[in-house]
């Protein structure tokens, strides 16, 4: 099938529907996908296999579209095509914000603006479409829609089945794909589906200026958000050495974690970007000359092979080192000051307690029989009183409340915990027949489109950005999973990771995605030929290879 014009049109129309995550309009784009599929004869005859699903346990009213297309063969093998319909916001467009969702008008406006040389060259080439969501990733969803249309009209060419998921909330809490897991599990039972592969169409881009390649991926990077809560010992600034400043320690911890390549994770010859700080602050709300009581920070942590337990173990050792540096620094400073002020130096003996959240809670359980009941009660109360509270802030409030309520030792304390959604790292090593088949199909698809691609296509192991495909696969790692559950401070009414649901449908994952530049920037643009023609041809080839006749 020739896809270019169909996907170009679908992309432009979907980009024209604003669907900023948590902006209140994600459902509009999901409805567009739903209406497109509902006009196909296949779904007119089988409306029960096309669902506009409202997200579950969500403070926002939004939906995803999920569709099941069954071939005329006898195989129960099923491929899931997935992609998200939400986008990041458009504040970065500045004065051009009203044009962010209008590709043609935006392109015309860019001609009158000063742009960097790369963007200007791409604009003048005519090979790119501009606008919020063109790259990340409505064009990918458009490709899957076109493929569904193709096979709905050629059921005899499909031995197995296709599922399409156009999910909301990928850019924030992944509630769209988490809710969709219920449908996948239900259809697995009702239709006896055997999920053999998930094809994500999330965006890819160049790795460096002048990179001539296009990329497809086996598996996906993982992501955790470890957080650190530091309780100091307050003092008046006039008695600086009489207290322990949590800001000083959290600053050292951030210095020792951020950009620390010893914390990068290497697998299959590919290495993650090192962790970096996403937030750091103390909890003082007003000005006083008393030092802060508490400070906290959280960090992005990418993984290829490390488990949540591995990450905690490594970070705890780093924090121990950070604390020693600060205690040594304080003593060096105090010693110098005592000499300058002609006072007698006495070593500052700060024995900072360092815990993971699980270790901290276990200690409090031993001392308080009602600890678990009180912890659950507070989480329920907080979730009821502040239903829109950010997951990271919810976690922080839980840690702070438990520390203040139960902890009796008035000493500097560090608590290491997880504070957000876990994106599972997926390593496609060919360990089973499904993985082997998926790997072979992707390489063959790459070779199949060689003559129509305007650039070499490289296969890499880990999709390098966070993606909802992480919810499609679960490794055999009970220890790592338990470490995440036990150290996720907001676990319970606010968030429960759907490990059990993913386990039931776990399947290999590949990414055959859109290509362009500047995702999440106002110059976001998608390369039309590669995305509207080469990408769907590759996906179609993989589908035919694995479940075609």
Image (tube, rainbow, N blue to C red):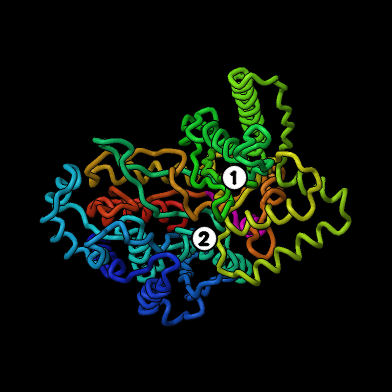
At a point 44% along the width and 46% down the height, the residue shown is: 465
SS for callout 1: strand
Q: Is residue 420 above or below residue 214?
A: below
Quadrant of the image for the C terminus? bottom left
- Please state which of the two labelled residues, at mark 1 or mark 2, is closer to the viewer: 1
What residue is disc 2 on? Answer: 174
The residue beneath circle 1 is: 226
Q: Quadrant of the N terminus?
A: bottom left
Magenta region includes residue 506: yes
Judging from the image, what secondary structure is the residue with disc 2 in? loop
Q: Are marks 1 and 2 in contact (CB under 8 Å)?
A: no
Q: Estimate the x, y position of residue 101 in percent, counting from the top left.
A: 27, 66
Is 549 situated above or below 66? above
Callout 1 environment at 10 Å: few (<14), some (14 to 19), or many (20+)?
many
Residue 248 position within the rendered picture, expressed as x and y whole percent measured from the top left: 57, 36
Q: Nearer the viewer, residue 301 or 233?
A: 233
Q: What's the magenta region? A: 498-508
Q: Determine the CA span between mark 1 and mark 2.
A: 18 Å
- Picture quarter containing residue 499? bottom right
Q: Quadrant of residue 238?
A: top right
Identify which residue, 9 or 42, lies in the foreground: 9
Residue 15 x, y percent position in the rendering? 29, 66
Residue drawn at the location 47% of the way across and 70% of the way down: 64
Give the left or right position of residue 180, taking residue 38 as reference: right
Residue at the front extreme? 342
């Amino acid at each position: 099938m020739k896809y270019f014009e169909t996907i170009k049109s679908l992309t432009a129309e979907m980009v024209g529907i604003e669907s900023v995550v948590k902006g209140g309009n994600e459902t509009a784009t999901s409805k567009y996908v739903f209406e497109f599929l509902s006009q196909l004869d296949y779904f007119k005859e089988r409306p029960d296999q096309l669902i506009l699903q409202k997200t579950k346990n969500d403070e926002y009213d939004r939906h995803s579209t999920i569709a099941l297309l069954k071939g005329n063969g006898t195989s129960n093998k099923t491929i899931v095509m997935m992609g998200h319909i939400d986008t990041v916001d458009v504040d970065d467009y500045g004065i051009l914000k009203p044009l962010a969702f209008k590709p043609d008008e935006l392109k015309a406006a860019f001609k009158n603006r000063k742009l960097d040389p790369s963007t200007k060259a791409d604009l003048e080439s005519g090979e790119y479409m501009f606008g919020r969501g063109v790259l990340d990733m409505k064009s990918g969803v458009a490709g899957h829609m076109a493929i569904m249309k193709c096979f709905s009209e050629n059921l005899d060419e499909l031995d197995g089945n296709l599922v399409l998921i156009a999910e909301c909330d990928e850019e924030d809490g992944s509630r769209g794909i988490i809710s969709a897991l219920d449908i996948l599990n239900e259809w697995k039972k009702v239709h006896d589906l055997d999920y053999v592969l998930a094809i994500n169409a999330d965006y890819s881009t160049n790795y460096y200026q002048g990179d001539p390649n296009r990329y497809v991926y086996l598996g996906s990077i993982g992501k955790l958000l470890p957080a650190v809560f530091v309780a100091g010992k307050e003092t008046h600034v006039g008695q600086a050495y009489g207290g322990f400043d949590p800001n000083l320690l959290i600053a050292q911890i951030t210095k020792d974690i951020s950009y620390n390549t010893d914390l990068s994770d290497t697998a299959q010859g590919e290495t993650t970007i090192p962790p970096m700080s996403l937030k750091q602050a103390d909890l003082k709300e007003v000005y006083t000359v008393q030092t802060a009581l508490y400070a906290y920070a959280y960090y992005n942590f990418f993984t290829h092979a490390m488990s949540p337990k591995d990450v905690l173990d490594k970070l705890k050792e780093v924090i121990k080192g950070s604390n020693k540096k600060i205690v040594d620094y304080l003593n060096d400073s105090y010693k110098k000051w005592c000499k300058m002020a002609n006072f007698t130096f006495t070593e500052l003996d700060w024995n900072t307690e360092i815990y993971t959240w699980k270790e901290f809670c276990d200690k409090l359980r031993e001392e308080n029989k009602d600890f678990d009941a009180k912890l659950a009660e507070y989480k329920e109360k907080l979730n009821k009183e502040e239903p829109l509270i950010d997951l990271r802030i919810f976690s922080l409030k839980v840690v702070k409340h438990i520390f203040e309520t139960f902890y009796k030792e008035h000493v500097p304390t560090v608590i290491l915990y997880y504070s957000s959604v876990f994106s599972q790292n997926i390593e496609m090593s060919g360990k089973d027949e499904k993985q082997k088949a998926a790997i072979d199909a992707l390489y063959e698809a790459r070779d199949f489109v060689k003559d129509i691609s305007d650039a070499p296509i490289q296969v890499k192991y880990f999709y390098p950005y966070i993606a909802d495909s992480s919810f499609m696969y679960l490794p055999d790692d009970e220890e790592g999973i338990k470490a995440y559950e036990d150290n996720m401070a907001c676990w319970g009414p606010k968030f429960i990771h759907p490990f059990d649901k993913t386990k039931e449908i776990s399947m290999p994952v590949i990414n055959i995605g859109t290509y362009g530049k500047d995702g999440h920037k106002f110059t976001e643009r998608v390369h039309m030929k590669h995305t509207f023609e080469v990408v769907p041809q590759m996906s179609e080839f993989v589908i035919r290879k694995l479940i075609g006749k």
